[in-house]
Amino acid sequence: MAEVTCDGLKEDNAALILFWLDGYVSAKEDETGISSEWVDELSSYIKEGCTEDAAQSVLGIVKKKYLDQQ
């Protein structure tokens, strides 16, 4: 999968990318469930990060917040 920046996050691919990111974080955190609250939190955090810098990696935003990585 190619790196997706905030600029590359489009309406037609956002749901797929969000679903993939949920699976990625869940695997790293050994979580097996999914909730609408979690999806809302994840999407809100990505939106906030992308507002700050549209050139940054969407995965980088998620790693920084949820996996303490950059």
Image (tube, grey):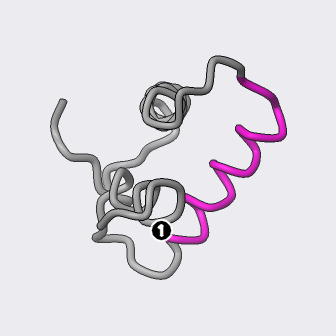
Q: Please, which residue is most extreme toward the right here?
A: 37
Residue at the spot 28% in from the left edge and 70% down from the top edge: 55
Left or right side of 61 for 49: right
Residue drawn where x is 27% and y is 47% of the image: 4
What is the residue that sits farthest to the front in this orientation? 30
The x and y percentages for residue 58 are 38, 54
Identify which residue, 20 or 34, lies in the foreground.
34
The quarter in which the N terminus is drawn is top left
Count of number-bearing discs: 1
Residue placed under numbered mark 1 in the picture: 50
Mark 1: few/some/many CA within 10 Å (<14, 14-19, 20+): some
**Left or right of 34 on screen, residue 14:** left
Whether residue 56 can be seen here: yes
State left or right for residue 27 relative to residue 37.
left
Residue 48 painted magenta: yes
Can residue 14 be seen in this snapshot? no
Q: What's drawn in magenta, residue-wise?
A: 34-50
Q: Look at the magenta stretch and give its main secondary structure.
A: helix
Compared with 59, 15 (above or below) is: above
Q: Residue at x 35, y 51 (%)?
A: 59
Q: Residue furthest top?
A: 32
Image position of 21 with respect to 56: above or below: above
Q: Toward the viewer: 16 or 64?
A: 64
**In x, y percent, where is residue 54?**
37, 71
* Amino acid type at image mark 1: Cys
The residue positioned 64% from the left and 49% from the top of the image is 43
Secondary structure at numbered mark 1: helix
